[in-house]
Image (tube, rainbow, N blue to C red):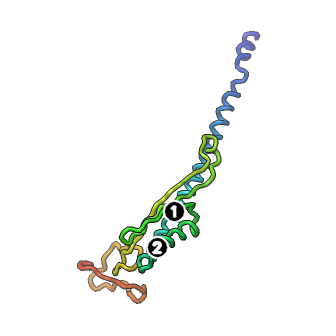
Amino acid sequence: MKETQKVRKFEHGQMMVLIVFAIFAIAGMVALILDGGAIMSNRRTAQAAADAGALAGAQRVCYGFTDGEAVANYYAVDKNGANSATISIVNNVVYVEATVESDSFFAKLFGMDTLTATADASAGCFGPMGKSVIPLARNGRAPLVGEPGPDPVEYGCQMQALEGETLE
C-alpha cells in the first residue's frame, strides 16, 4: 500500500501542465480568428473600394471629363471606406490601389498595432465607340440559323453581331 502512494505522490500536478498548454493553444486560436477575420474583412472592403473608384473614374474619363482621379478617389475613400487610394490614369484606363487599415486585437502583443490590406482594380473605355464603360459578357452559345436573337430595343443597347456568329 505504501509503495503505491509513493508512486502517485510524483504524479500530482501533471494536469496543470496540460491545462497551461491548452490555454495557450486556445488563446492562439482566438487571436488568429479575430485578427485573421479583421484582415479578411479589410481586404474585402479594400477590393470594393478599388472597384468602385476605378469604375467611377473610368466613366468620367470615357466621357471626356478631366476629373477622373478626383472622382475615383471620392468613390474609393469617401464612399467605400478605404483609408487611402492611389490613382493613376494611363491611356484612358484608371488604375486604383485602395488601402484599408484597422487596429489589431492580439497582434499588438507582437508589435503590430494596425492590420493593413490593399487591393487594386482597373477600368477603362472599351465600349463599341470607346466612349463607355461596360461590363463585358458573352452568351456561350451562338444562336442557331433562323433563331431570333435578343431584341436590342428590349435591352436598350446596341447589339453588334460578328461574322460567324450563327451555327448551321
Circle 1: element type: strand
**Near-viewer residue (126 or 13):** 126
- Residue positioned 42% across, 88% down in the render: 154
- x and y percent of residue 128 in the render? 34, 80
Q: Which residue does the numbered mark 1 point to in the structure image?
A: 85
- Residue 161 vertical placement versus 85 (above, below): below
Dot 2 or dot 1, earlier in sequence: 2
Position of 24 compared to 76: left or right?
right
Residue linked to disc 2: 68
Drawn side of residue 62 relative to residue 5, left or right:
left
Q: In which quarter of the image is residue 8?
A: top right
Q: Is mark 2 on a helix, strand or loop?
A: helix
* Left or right: residue 100 compared with residue 61: right
Q: Residue 10 carries which label?
A: none
User: In the displayed image of the protein, which residue is found farthest to the top?
Assistant: 2
- Location of residue 121 in the rendering, given as x and y in whole percent from the top left corner: 45, 64
Instruction: Residue type at mark 1: give it.
Output: Ala
Q: How crowded is mark 2: few (under 14 residues within 10 Å), some or many (20 or more)?
A: many
If the image is split into quadrants, where does the C terminus sit?
bottom left
Name the kind of residue labelled 2 in the image: Gly
Instruction: State the image coordinates of residue 130 (x, y, percent, origin top left).
Output: 35, 78
Quarter of the image with the N terminus is top right
Residue found at x 46% / y 65%: 87
| Residue sitting at x 71%, y 17% | 10
Foreground: 143 or 40? 40
Alpha carbon distance from label 2 to label 1: 13 Å
